[in-house]
Image (cartoon, helix red, strand yellow):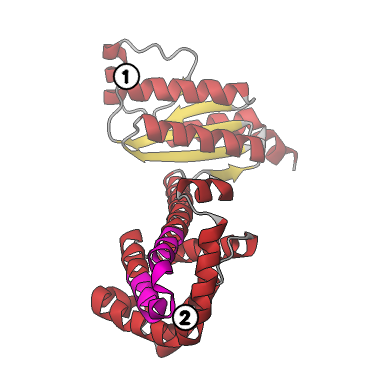
Amino acid sequence: MNNDDFLQLFDVTSQDLNRIGEFGKLVSPKIDEVVDALYVHMQAALGDTFTLHFSEEKALTRAKSLSRRAWLEFLAGQWDERYIQSRVRIGEVHAQLQIEPRHYLAIMEAAVDMLIAAGIDGIAAADREDTIHAIRCVANMEAAMVVDVYSTRTTEIITQQSRALTDMSTPITAIWDGILMLPVVGIVDSRRAQDIMQRMLEQIAEKRALVFILDISGVAVVDTAVANHLIRMTKAARLMGSYTIVSGLSPSVAQTIVELGIEVGDMKTTGNLQDALKIAFERAGVEQKVAAK
């Protein structure tokens, strides 16, 4: 959603912004009092959450300073690029600190009430209702933008964390020039199989691997689904120019594959890692290189 969409969605006009600008002239001199009162309210409302974020006086002082600046920007009544970028940063900071939107929205509402109370007596009676309406509309619009940014950044953080966990669960190791190995442990479902294949192909391309060993001795269950995942992985690796060996097939796993009638095609398998390494070294010409030396 672009900036004009926000104005249209919340029915905010230039006249509303002008009203806030006029109101700001009355309230800006009192902003320190409002911010101090707001943080007293926050401490009472949030309790341990407040203490967690502001355990040190220095952090509290800085937060008040930033809050003061943010509200002065609001009271200027300018919905311009500078103001919008300021709100984007607020959303990003809330995401980094993992401040929940419900807390932010509750404090935002309290702050708006305090601002109105601090300056509404200075507004002509005939204009008060329109001024309050303008303040609340723009405050709601700002809150929506901040929460949008918060949601986007939080999703990005979760994606990065998920990627990091995937990388940890698929520890691909270069055991020799041109030879990569991945020990797979646990349960292989469709999602994990896709992650393994993606990492596998990325590493094959990056390392220009001639041979890829997929060791499944630690896989809890090998059924039709798992076997099909393995076949797709080996075919994908072959398309990348890498010879794939699936090692760690126990007698019981081999028997299960036969009983299920799974067609493994030309997928190369071994009962243990030692045999897989021997084949891998031969394919990569390691023995010849060592002998030549």
Q: Going by the picture, which residue comes out furthest to the front? A: 126
Residue 151 seen anywhere in this rendered image of the structure: yes
Circles 1 and 2 in contact, beta carbons < 8 Å: no
Compared with 130, 180 (above or below) is above
Q: Position of residue 149 (x, y in %)?
A: 48, 55
Q: Position of residue 180 (x, y in %)?
A: 56, 39
What element does badge 1 sit on?
helix
Compared with 205, 110 (above or below) is below
Q: Badge 1 is on which residue? A: 224
The number of numbered discs placed on residues in the rendered structure image is 2
> Is 252 situated left or right of 132 in this image?
left
Q: Residues within 10 Å of mark 2 (few under 14, many from 20)?
A: many
Q: Quadrant of the C terminus?
A: top right
In the image, what residue type sits under mark 1?
Answer: Thr
In the image, what residue type sits under mark 2?
Answer: Val
Residue at image position (42%, 59%) is: 143
Q: Badge 2 is on which residue? A: 27
**Extent of the magenta region:** 110-138
